[in-house]
Image (tube, helix red, strand yellow):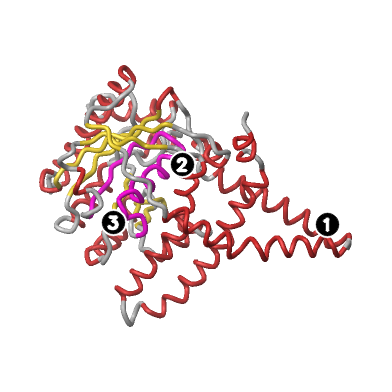
Amino acid sequence: MDLIALLKSQFLCHLIFCYVFIASGLIINTIQLFTLLLWPINKQLFRKINCRLSYCISSQLVMLLEWWSGTECIIHTDPRAYPKYGKENAIVVLNHKFEIDFLCGWSLAERFGVLGGSKVLAKKELAYVPIIGWMWYFTEMVFCTRKWEQDRKTVSESLLHLRDYPEKYFFLIHCEGTRFTEKKHQISMQVAQAKGLPSLKHHLLPRTKGFAITVRSLRNVVSAVYDCTLNFRNNENPTLLGVLNGKKYHADLYVRRIPLGEVPEDEDRCAAWLHKLYQEKDALQEEYSRTGTFPGTPMVPPRRPWTLVNWLFWASLLLYPFFRFLVNMVRSGSSLTLASFVLVFFVASMGVRWMIGVTEIDKGSAYGNMDSKQKHSD
């Protein structure tokens, strides 16, 4: 292991990253709270400010992926569609198999300059996660409970509010609803068989109602669906902990632009269209398993410096007073003070592990339990 790799694997480096992320995130959340005063006066100004504040938080995670770990994502796409990426609103349909697939989606948005305003359809519990969940609240993310009777109205209303959003955005949606595991796949394919749908080898059965209502609510505002299929070379199994340790991964992302006019408006036809899309995605993954590549022209969008600049700004602002505080604590020689420092260090360590644990596949939703099997529907 070389010196740089050894340095990247040290917990002290991880603690510095997490301290900067947590401290800056709480400061930004506080600023966002005060921006609520703008909402009744100038809603669009409120939105533009919160897009920039949101970027200050989410770009720190993208910085870890792109600059710290050095992970590079090669995009395979149609060169004729490529110039439109980042110049239009789009619904991004991404497979949900890897612990960092959400981060790769953010990286895609960052490369095309729309990270700050980009949205996700996320489970409601994430709204209560400090920093990221609170940031999402202020940027009008769409939250769902996964209980369609409750979600039909709230999700539709949230989406309709985005029709006059002043910034370009990608609306990222994982139609499978949860990350792929063998257990979940087995249950999902039992549901597919019961519904007379073709089996999928590399994906779970997509949940169509959330996608259909997204398309219906954002029609004439969103220009296209970006069908994105992500995979990693050499059977890599990327994790957020690996990224934090500076491990470099090698991602391939197939992106197909489908004009929204080609997606049916009728809910049943839209559902059939989405099932067909996932059958095509499954065939793509199978081809990747055989050949190690996706169709389309491979391209690497330029890595923008702003994620690194943003992190360096917050680090320079927050690390000096932090280290000065630590030095003063050590110099005090107080046993109580030193014990307090050890306690804070331990709590911070547990906090870091908890935040990483939120992304782990085995900490995902209960999809696939026998109860879920009985209740699962589109």
Single out the residue that lies furthest toward the top: 290
Graded by Cα atoms within 10 Å as few (under 14), some (14 to 19) or many (20 or more), the crowding at tag 2 reads: few
* Residue 142 lies in quadrant: bottom left
Q: Nearer the viewer, residue 196 or 103?
A: 103
In percent of width and height, residue 208 lies at 25, 42
Identify the residue position indicated by label 3 in the image: 169
Graded by Cα atoms within 10 Å as few (under 14), some (14 to 19) or many (20 or more), the crowding at tag 1 reads: few
Res. 53 mark: none
Identify the residue position indicated by label 2 in the image: 365
Is 83 above or below relative to 155? above
Is 312 above or below relative to 31? above
Q: Nearer the viewer, residue 192 or 243?
A: 243
Residue shown at the point (43%, 22%) measured from the top left: 234
Residue type pointed to by label 3: Tyr
| Left or right of 10, for residue 111 | left
Label 3: state its secondary structure. Answer: loop
Magenta-colored span: 89-116
* Residue 162 lies in quadrant: bottom left
- Give me the C-alpha separation between circle 1 and circle 3: 47 Å
